[in-house]
Amino acid sequence: MNKDFSKEEVLKKLGDRIKSLRIKKGYSSYEYFAYEHNISRAQFGRYERGEDLRFSTLTKIVQAFDMTFEEFFAEGFSDEDTQTLK
C-alpha cells in the first residue's frame, strides 16, 4: 500500500532514528555525541527533534554512527512506508 507522508512526518522519523541510534551507541547526551563527531551541538539537537537537515549533514550523521545508508534506514522505515512527499 502506498501512503503519502508530509515532510514533517519524514523529518520526525529521521529524528527518532537519529536519537535511537545515539542512545544505542551509549550517549545519553546528544551534545556529547555531536561534540565528539564534530557536528554542531545546537543543530544536532534540532535534527533529533525532527527539524530540517541537509543531505550532506545526514551523510555526516550516518558516518558518525559507522553505518551505511541501508543500515540506517533498516529500522524505523519499512517497505510499507514507501514515502511520497506532499
Image (spheres, rainbow, N blue to C red):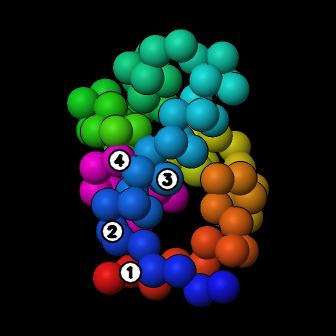
Amino acid identity at mark 4: Gly
Quickly name the residue at label 2: 7
Q: Is residue 6 left or right of residue 33?
A: left
x, y percent for residue 30: 43, 23
Distance from the alpha carbon under mark 2 to that under mark 3: 10 Å
The span shown in magenta is 50-59
Q: Residue at x 33, y 68 (%)?
A: 7
Q: Earlier in the sequence, mark 2 or mark 3?
A: 2
Secondary element at image label 4: loop
Q: Earlier in the sequence, mark 3 or mark 4?
A: 3
Q: Are marks 1 and 3 in contact (CB under 8 Å)?
A: no
Q: Earlier in the sequence, mark 1 or mark 3?
A: 3
Residue situated in front as seen by the camera: 30 or 38: 30
Numbered mark located on residue 13 in the image? 3
Q: Earlier in the sequence, mark 1 or mark 4?
A: 4
Which quadrant of the figure contains the N terminus?
A: bottom right
Amino acid identity at mark 1: Leu
Residue situated in front as seen by the camera: 33 or 9: 9
Quickly name the residue at label 4: 50
